[in-house]
């Protein structure tokens, strides 16, 4: 490719609503919606809105991947359509399904009418393959929505590779092909978030179509802000200690490192108990709030309790 | 749309080329996306460009480290803003050179980024012994600078200060809150020292780039991605990194090996179908199928634990530990001269590190011997598991097939291959070596469903992909 030739942006691309137009605005508005994003996160969200591409959000559990999608929907005042993935999910749960009950009812009701021809129904599905009988599942719902929507495909790494391939048409072409009806195209291009915990390598085809955002545990400064926002009354020095402790724990080799919500839980606990000092003795709550496995508590106790 | 200068686009292309040369897979589509994104983004800030390029080019957390390193070279080290800033600081330093020792202490205590940067610049100038034009990666400059700064000594000093005004006698029963406080401030000191080291490395990189140009420096600094590292040659740190990356792959390997090809739908559940037909006036419009029964998987692992494949062995252990936790029907055997069952060793271990330690102990305690004897080990393995093998069992062998010129005993493998559904062999040696010396790989190969060279994580990934 020759340097200097930027491919033009196709005119069919969506004109982003003002709130999503630039990173700074996204960041400010997300903060108003209660989500403290860093520059990178805000930048990727705004870029995705302008390019009309899905965002693949990856990262450890409890770093706010799902919340990001919810907060973006809230801040942009767009409907949120959520597809929770699980092993064995298929197109009838993700894309669309024919409502056979209504189809049967229609046949029964239409049987008496002059124009009704059973042969036509059998041969080319006259009457029964109609959008009226189509049940839109989340993906179809998101692209057919009257208002631009936010589509959250949660834990996409749980679906099998075959089903993953079914998503590609929606994600890249923004359409769903129904054999009996033809293509159903998007009324608006939805802003799509796919979250993944990285338990499985996703296919190259899917990754190629997405922007990638890795949400790691927040930097100390940002986590401090998050705690301050969630638990406004907490003593500042204590917050400082708490953040340092959480960050130290995340670096240990524990089964489940403390997530942001656990930091906030402990902050609440400390606040409610009116503590002024972090106490890690076995009888205290500290480590037991942050860590969820007995072995982890032991590892952490050993690593932090005894001075090296 | 922001007007984007040709130099930036040109640089971006070279940046992408460099990433690809390092092995990061970037397709044409992604390159176009990146260029388009650069075109429509306000690039006033360093973060803006970084965000845009990262989101469009990098699609896995595994490559973020490489991205950052290369990005810093191409866009940070010699962007106009950066140069101006460096000059200003340079002039500033010339006027009032810092007392470096004092400044380092301040950095370790309070950790201001700006001060750390200034310290790094002055230190590189003073101690780096920078020789223009030399095609080096700057490792020695870095070492000289850090030695000149006496960073390690000052760090230790600061740590000692942090860990206790009160004497060592009291420490054991000291107030836990204080103990924790000390631990945490120790950690902060360590972090600040690391940050300063990073700054020094950055300054050196910037000077190298100014000296020889970015492409040349990038080439000097190029090293393989973690996924492409030779597992057998990996250092401790690299091995830890490899283990971290293996997580998702283990799951994938395990599920692929276990998957039995069968129809997605099982037998019709008559009861449920009749019930469902009630809603449609007794016409069974919707057939209800029984839930597919997950097949109880059976996996048999035989792993070479000899010294000659020590690093590969710890890799194997890591892999098998994860699989042992995922699948109950997994029997594993370790062998050198003799083979012995180690299923319980894996089951009791809580993580890969523990499993490796337990395995080392076991190898000695169980008297597995010193010289690898594949023929003997296969016979013993066959004697123990041969009887239970059936079509749904999978045998997985890890080893270099270096038989010390002893009899191969391929009959045992052949008879297992007849009974088992499949036999896979993962060999840490490249296939060009399989016919050389005492390698028995070519002898065993006909009896295996699939033999794969597994030198790197990428090899393992490809193997898994092929299985699907």
Image (cartoon, coloured by chain):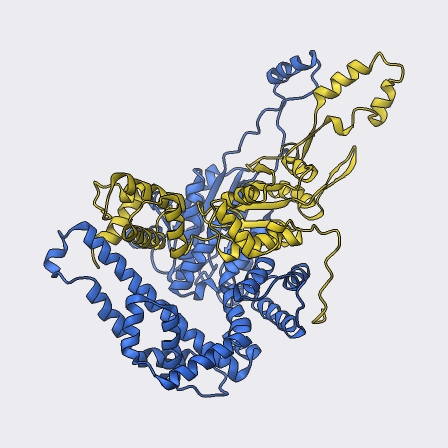
Chain colours: A yellow, B blue
Q: Is residue A148 above or below residue A11?
A: above
Residue A97: quarter of image: top right
Is residue A71 something that shows in the picture?
yes
Left or right of B268? Residue B205 is left
Left or right of A265? Residue A135 is right
Name the residue: 50% across, 44% down: A33
Where residue B175 appears, as percent x and y from the top left, is 16, 51
Name the residue: 23% across, 41% down: A284
Residue A177: quarter of image: top right
Where residue B459 appears, as percent x and y from the top left, is 54, 58
Q: Residue furthest left?
A: B169
Where residue B161 appears, as percent x and y from the top left, is 20, 66
Specify the quadrant that holds the N terminus of chain B. Answer: bottom right
Marks counted in the figure total 0
Q: Nearer the viewer, residue B98 or B196?
A: B98
Name the residue: 22% across, 58% down: B182
Is residue B451 something that shows in the picture?
no
Q: Nearer the viewer, residue B140 or A186?
A: A186
Left or right of B284? Residue A116 is right
Where residue A89 appears, as percent x and y from the top left, is 59, 35
């Amino acid at each position: 490719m020759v340097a200097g030739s930027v491919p033009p942006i196709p005119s069919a691309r969506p004109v982003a609503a003002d709130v999503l137009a630039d990173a700074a605005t996204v960041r400010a508005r997300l903060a108003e919606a209660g989500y403290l994003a860093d520059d990178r996160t805000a930048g990727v969200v705004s870029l995705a809105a302008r390019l009309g591409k899905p965002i693949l959000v990856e990262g450890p559990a409890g770093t706010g991947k799902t919340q990001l999608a919810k907060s973006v929907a809230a801040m942009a005042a767009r409907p949120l359509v959520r597809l929770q993935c699980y092993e064995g999910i298929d197109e009838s749960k993700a894309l669309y399904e024919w409502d056979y009950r209504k189809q049967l009812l229609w046949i029964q009701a239409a049987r008496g009418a002059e124009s009704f021809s059973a042969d036509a129904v059998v041969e080319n599905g006259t009457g029964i393959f109609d959008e009226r009988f189509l049940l839109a599942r989340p993906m179809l719902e998101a692209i057919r929505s009257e208002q631009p929507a936010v589509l959250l495909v949660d834990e996409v790494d749980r679906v099998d590779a075959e089903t993953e391939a079914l998503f590609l048409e929606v994600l890249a072409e923004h359409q769903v092909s129904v054999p009996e009806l033809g293509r159903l195209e998007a009324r608006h291009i939805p802003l799509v978030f796919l979250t993944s915990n990285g338990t499985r390598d996703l296919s190259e085809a899917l990754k190629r179509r997405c922007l990638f955002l890795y949400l790691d545990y927040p930097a100390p400064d940002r986590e401090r802000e998050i705690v301050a926002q969630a638990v406004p009354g907490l003593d500042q020095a204590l917050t400082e200690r708490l953040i340092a402790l959480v960050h130290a724990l995340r670096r240990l080799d524990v089964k489940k490192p403390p997530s942001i919500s656990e930091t906030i839980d402990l902050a609440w606990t400390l606040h409610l108990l009116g503590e002024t000092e972090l106490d890690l003795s076995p009888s205290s709550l500290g480590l037991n709030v942050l860590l969820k496995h007995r072995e982890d508590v032991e590892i952490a106790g050993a690593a932090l309790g005894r001075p090296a | 749309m922001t007007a984007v200068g040709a130099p930036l686009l040109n640089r971006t292309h070279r940046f992408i080329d460099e990433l690809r040369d390092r092995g990061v897979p970037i397709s044409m589509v992604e390159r176009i996306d990146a260029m388009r994104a650069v075109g429509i983004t306000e690039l006033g800030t360093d973060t803006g460009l970084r965000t845009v390029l990262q989101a469009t080019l990098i699609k896995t957390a595994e490559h973020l480290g490489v991205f950052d390193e290369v990005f810093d070279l191409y866009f940070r080290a010699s962007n106009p803003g950066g140069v101006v800033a460096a000059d200003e600081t340079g002039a500033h330093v010339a006027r009032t050179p810092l007392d470096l020792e004092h400044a380092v202490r301040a950095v370790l205590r309070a950790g201001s980024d700006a001060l750390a940067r200034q310290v790094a610049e002055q230190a590189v100038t003073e101690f780096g012994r920078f020789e223009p034009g030399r095609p080096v990666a700057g490792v020695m400059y870095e070492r000289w600078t850090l030695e000149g700064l006496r960073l390690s000594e000052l760090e230790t000093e600061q740590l000692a200060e942090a860990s206790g005004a009160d004497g060592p006698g009291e420490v054991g029963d000291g107030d836990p809150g204080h103990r924790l406080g000390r631990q945490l401030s120790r950690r902060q000191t360590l972090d600040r020292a690391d940050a300063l080291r990073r700054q020094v490395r950055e300054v050196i990189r910037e000077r190298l780039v100014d000296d020889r140009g970015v492409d040349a420096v990038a080439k000097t600094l190029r090293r393989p991605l973690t996924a492409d590292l030779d597992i057998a040659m990996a250092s401790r740190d690299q091995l830890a990194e490899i283990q971290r990356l293996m997580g998702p792959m283990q799951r994938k390997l395990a599920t692929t090996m276990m998957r039995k090809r069968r129809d997605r739908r099982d037998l019709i559940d008559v009861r449920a179908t009749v019930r469902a037909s009630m809603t449609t006036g007794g016409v069974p419009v919707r057939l209800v199928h029984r839930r597919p029964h997950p097949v109880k998987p059976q996996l048999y692992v035989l792993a070479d634990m000899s010294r000659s494949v020590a690093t590969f062995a710890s890799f194997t252990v890591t892999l098998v530990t994860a699989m042992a936790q995922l699948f109950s029907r997994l029997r594993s055997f370790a062998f050198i001269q003799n083979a012995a069952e180690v299923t319980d060793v894996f089951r009791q271990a809580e993580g890969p590190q523990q499993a490796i330690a337990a395995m080392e102990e076991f190898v000695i305690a169980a008297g597995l011997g010193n010289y690898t004897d594949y023929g003997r080990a296969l016979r013993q393995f066959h004697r123990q598991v041969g009887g239970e093998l059936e079509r749904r069992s999978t045998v997985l062998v890890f080893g270099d097939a270096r038989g010390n010129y002893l009899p191969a005993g391929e009959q045992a493998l052949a008879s297992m291959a007849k009974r088992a559904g499949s036999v896979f062999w993962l060999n840490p040696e490249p296939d060009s070596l399989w016919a050389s010396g005492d390698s028995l790989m070519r002898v065993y190969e006909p009896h295996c469903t699939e033999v794969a060279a597994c030198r790197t994580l990428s090899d393992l990934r490809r193997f898994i992909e092929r299985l699907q």
